[in-house]
Image (cartoon, grey):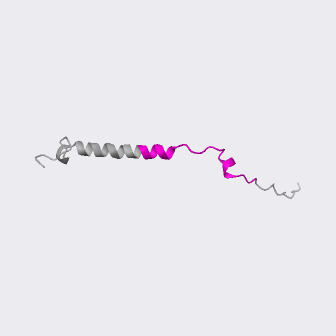
Amino acid sequence: MAIEPTTQADPPEIISTVKARGGVTGNKVRYVLAISLLLVVAGMVAVHLGVPGGLMDGATSAPGKN
């Protein structure tokens, strides 16, 4: 059984970044993330301001007046 010498393969084809990503850009994900983050912060501020005196009474509260 004879071993044949290997031949070098063709060099890889170099393509531009536009062709590599298929021309798909700008999903607007950053805007969705930014708006979601702002809404979460606004919701937390609204809950914080809606609690009278900054205290919450409930099953996890310490007994007595705080």
Percent coordinates x, y for residue 18 in the rendering: 67, 49
Residue in the picture at 42% in, 44% down:
35
In the foreground, 7 or 12: 12
Percent coordinates x, y for residue 5 in the rendering: 86, 58
Residue in the picture at 59% in, 45% down:
25
Displayed quadrant of residue 40: top left
Residue in the picture at 78% in, 56% down:
11
Percent coordinates x, y for residue 7 in the rendering: 84, 57
Magenta region, residue range: 13-35
- Quarter containing the N terminus: bottom right
Left or right: where 29 falls relative to 43: right
Left or right: where 11 falls relative to 42: right
Left or right: where 49 falls relative to 29: left
Q: Which residue is farthest left? A: 64
Q: Which residue is farthest right? A: 2
In the foreground, 1 or 37: 37
Query: Quick check: is 31 in the magenta stretch?
Result: yes
Left or right: where 64 falls relative to 39: left
Residue in the picture at 52% in, 43% down:
28
Percent coordinates x, y for residue 24 in the rendering: 62, 43
Total marks placed: 0
